[in-house]
Image: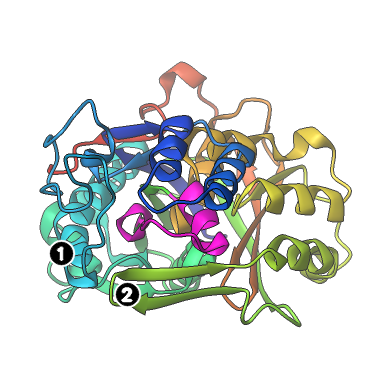
């Protein structure tokens, strides 16, 4: 049997920030000259984002002291501080496990898969480090068997969900009885900082926090019918871009370089990458494209000559949640699983972009079980999880 995603669960922190409030916070930081303020306002306004979620409850002035960040990221005068990487990573260690577990529990509930049925765990993250790692912590927090095989895909950036799903598909290919839990958790806002650097400003304008989990199996008896069959995967390195999307560790957080060339490189390369990926097959019926930013989606749409509505799911997730790095494409695929307009047999192309510049692709086929929509298990997209839960 073909490996398939049976279900997808999502989770976000409780603190939800409107984009205009985040814009004003960054634009009014001490030391921001007129040029910097104009750059900040232009970047935030052009992002096509309305709200983002964050574990940094202090960013919401209406809820001071309500989270677990201990006011170490902003002071009483609303001045952004510059905590060390150690301080930021400590919050990752405290906040990420609950978010991961919440997304996983939703996926397991939607698939009607018990903890005892999980045979493998694959975790994905690039926004923090800890050992024992996220894979171990999920086994502990979900009460999984101590014999569950565990793998971690680390520091591959926004594209990493698809390699994580690909690994799960390879496991299912080799062991048709395997039931694999894949969890992507990213706390991107841990690494925000006040800056006049245009690349840091762009990063601050789009990145957000969230987690998504998928149940993958080739066993037709596991998890119930339907889902997204995993037909094909492709990885492509572009001929340029190695210095344009870079994720490094600094003394005051992880530093993201996003040059203005990234959308242009995507626009130039996307047609060739997708043509090689499809290998002459007909165009997909639906597109799940990672929204690295509005300009990236615009370039993909133009480069592939897509109908403007083709990227509606990607644009709506960007609008409602921002760029949650690796987790984002799974939020989009969850919407497609729930979208009755995408019917049985529809072919879905998933695309994500990561440092390198790397294009990760997956071709999926949607299978709709013979049940009505109101019989499905699950809850709304983006389950809200307390930062200290």
Q: Position of residue 86 (x, y in %)?
A: 18, 71
Q: Which residue is mark 1?
A: 90
User: What is the crowding at mark 2: few (fewer than 14 residues within 10 Å), some, or many (at least 20)?
Assistant: some
Q: CA distance from mark 2 to mark 1?
A: 22 Å
Q: Position of residue 53 (x, y in %)?
A: 36, 39
Residue mark closest to the camera, 2 vs 1: 1
Q: Which residue is mark 2?
A: 151
Say left or right for 220 vs 45: left
> Quadrant location of the N terminus?
bottom right
Q: Nearer the viewer, residue 81 or 162?
A: 81
Say left or right for 262 vs 332: right
Residue 358, relative to residue 36: is it above or below?
A: below
Q: Nearer the viewer, residue 186 or 102?
A: 186
Residue 44, relative to residue 17: is it above or below?
A: below
Q: Secondary structure at mark 1?
A: helix
Give whichever of discs 2 and 1 has the lower sequence position. 1
- Over which residues does the magenta segment extend? 187-207
Q: Residue at x 66, y 45 (%)?
A: 294
Say left or right for 237 vs 336: right
């Amino acid at each position: 049997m073909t490996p398939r995603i049976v279900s997808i669960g999502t989770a976000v922190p409780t603190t939800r920030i409107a984009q205009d409030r985040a814009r004003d916070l960054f634009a009014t930081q001490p030391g921001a000259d007129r040029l910097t303020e104009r750059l900040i306002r232009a970047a935030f306004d052009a992002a096509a984002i309305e709200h983002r979620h964050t574990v940094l409850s202090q960013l919401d002035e209406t809820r001071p002291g309500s989270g677990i960040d201990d006011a170490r990221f902003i002071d009483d005068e609303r001045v952004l501080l510059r905590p060390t990487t150690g301080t930021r990573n400590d919050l990752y260690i405290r906040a990420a496990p609950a978010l991961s577990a919440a997304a996983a529990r939703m996926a397991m509930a939607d698939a009607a898969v018990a903890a005892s049925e999980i045979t493998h765990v694959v975790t994905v993250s690039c926004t923090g480090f800890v050992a024992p790692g996220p894979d171990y912590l999920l086994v502990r927090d979900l009460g999984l068997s101590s014999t569950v095989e565990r793998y971690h895909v680390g520091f591959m950036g926004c594209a990493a969900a698809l390699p994580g799903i690909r690994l799960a598909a390879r496991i299912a290919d080799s062991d048709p009885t395997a039931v694999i839990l894949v969890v992507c958790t990213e706390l991107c806002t841990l690494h925000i900082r006040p800056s006049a650097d245009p690349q840091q400003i762009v990063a601050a304008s789009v990145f957000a926090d969230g987690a998504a989990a998928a149940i993958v199996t080739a066993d037709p008896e596991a998890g119930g019918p339907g889902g997204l069959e995993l037909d094909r995967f492709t990885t492509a390195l572009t001929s340029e871009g190695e210095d344009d999307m870079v994720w490094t560790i600094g003394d005051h957080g992880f530093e993201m370089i996003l040059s203005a060339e990234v959308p242009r490189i995507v626009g130039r390369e996307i047609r060739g990458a997708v043509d090689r990926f499809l290998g002459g097959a007909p165009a997909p019926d639906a597109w799940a494209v990672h929204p690295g930013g509005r300009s990236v989606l615009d370039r993909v749409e133009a480069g592939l000559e897509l109908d403007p509505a083709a990227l509606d799911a990607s644009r709506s997730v960007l609008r409602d949640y921002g760029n949650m790095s690796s987790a984002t494409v799974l939020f989009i695929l969850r919407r497609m699983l729930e979208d009755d307009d995408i019917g049985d047999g529809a072919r879905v192309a998933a695309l994500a972009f990561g440092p390198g510049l790397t294009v990760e692709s997956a071709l999926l086929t949607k299978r709709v079980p013979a049940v009505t929509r109101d019989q499905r298990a699950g809850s709304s997209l983006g389950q809200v999880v307390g930062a200290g839960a």
